[in-house]
Amino acid sequence: MTDKNVIEKAGALALKIHENHTRLSGEGYYWHLHRVAELLEENNVNDPEILAGAYLHHILDSKKYSKDDLKKDFSPEIAEIVFEYARISGNEISSIDPKNYNESIIVQTYLNLIKNPKTLIIRLADKVDNIRSAYVLPKENARRVAEKAMYLYSPICQLLGIHRFVVELENEAFKILNPGEYYSIEAYLKKKMPEMESVLEDTAEFIRDILGEKGIPAKLDYRIKHIYSIYRKAQKYRETKNYKGLNQIYDIAAMRVLVDSVEQCYMTEDILKQAWSVVPNERDDYIMHPKPSGYRSIHNTFAVSPTMNLEIQIKTREMHEENEFGIASHTFYKTGEQLKKSFQTSPNWLADISFIKNKGELRIDQFKKYVYVFTPKGDIKQLARGATPVDFAYSIHKDLGNACVGVTVNGDFQKLSYELKDGDRVEIKTLKHKKLPSPDWLDFVKTRKGREEIRKALRKDSERKELS
């Protein structure tokens, strides 16, 4: 079966299975799946397994279609993408409280859930499509969707360098979470747009001419920075300067200059330095020092007019193609034997792009020391690595630990001595009248709190018996 046929087969099956399924907006569920696949294609994702998975990622939600059906109808690779998607959907973080938000723990915990990068990229595209229509949800539901888009999925996209997804997730989430600021900035941009576009067009024409004279062929385009990015910049001004309004923020536009070679990148920067003064402390050389996502470019900010500072990004055409979809562009979708081999030998493929390592916010060994698991409500618990369900129970409350008689992990019954793994969803089973732990638990509990609570309960019971 050709790649095209596999994708068409997946689309046709999704249309059939989800024929009578609708979203809260009233639209047929199939159209969401179709848009996710389209969004991936628009971003140059042409891997047939990913595109088929995009159509099938909710197929197991239906009682009409089973895991066995999926194994029979599609390749093991596609089936595994869908199985993993269903697993991470079941282990979803229920909500994020921005006031008590630890970006490092939440993002890395989520990444630790995912073994296949193809599943992750479908998940991110799914969230982009979801945030586009979140406004139809009840207010509280929309707020939860927006907070997860802003504080979970956008940081992951930033880590992977998927700038297009970052812009949409942040803007749409910001519109829900802070509509007053959003529409205020939008109105300001509409008012300033004619003036800014005039300066940008004149600047682009000048750069083309001056580089042409030096024999450097260049492709130019420009954009206004997205609304949430402007808001963040305004917040920095509020914290550090005598902020008087958006008029103070001059560098709210960016221009991209694409040339043929690294040498021409530096030549172009030198030419522009001769034409305009440079804004101090705004230069970044991501060619010499690439971002963790692999992003490469020279960024410098120039005073191109009395009312406008302009960030100019200088890069080669090849860098631009890689930058557009970050790590995804040159890791997720190449199908060379070497890449396949690396995925097979390194199932924890995200270790090389560790969020913690790249952000520098926690020690690199932080996530070797702890295990991160979910409560039934979707909250994250941090426990010592090697912890068991008994440790989990006592981390919530001593009474839950003492009354514990069993546990399900990801819906399956496990022994109380089971060693918890990252991303496990843990539900403790109790008996109402059980008040004492088993002494045998001391043989396998890992955490100090667990051991102390067990010994305390046993000691109290022993003292009670002596008195009676």
Image (cartoon, rainbow, N blue to C red):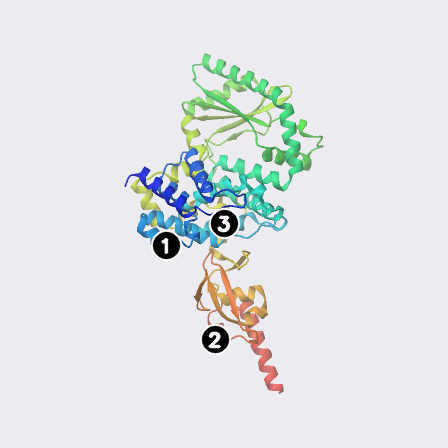
Res. 108 mark? 3
Report the residue that reaches farthest toward the bottom.
Answer: 468
Residue assigned mark 1: 67
Mark 2–mark 3 Cα distance, whole angstroms, equals 34 Å
* Residue drawn where x is 37% and y is 54% of the image: 67
Q: From the top left corner, tell me how far across and down residue 409 is, in percent.
A: 46, 62
Q: Quadrant of residue 54?
A: top left
Q: From the top left corner, tell me how far across and down residue 447 is, in percent.
A: 52, 65
In the picture shown, does residue 77 fall above or below 43?
below
Give whichever of 103, 411 is nearer the camera: 411
Residue assigned mark 2: 440
Q: Earlier in the sequence, mark 1 or mark 2?
A: 1
Q: Nearer the viewer, mark 3 or mark 1?
A: 1
Asked if residue 457 lies left or right of residue 213, the reply is right
Which class describes the residues within 10 Å of circle 2: few (<14), some (14-19), or many (20+)? few
Q: Nearer the viewer, mark 1 or mark 2?
A: 1
Q: Earlier in the sequence, mark 2 or mark 3?
A: 3
Q: What type is the residue that disc 1 sits on?
A: Lys
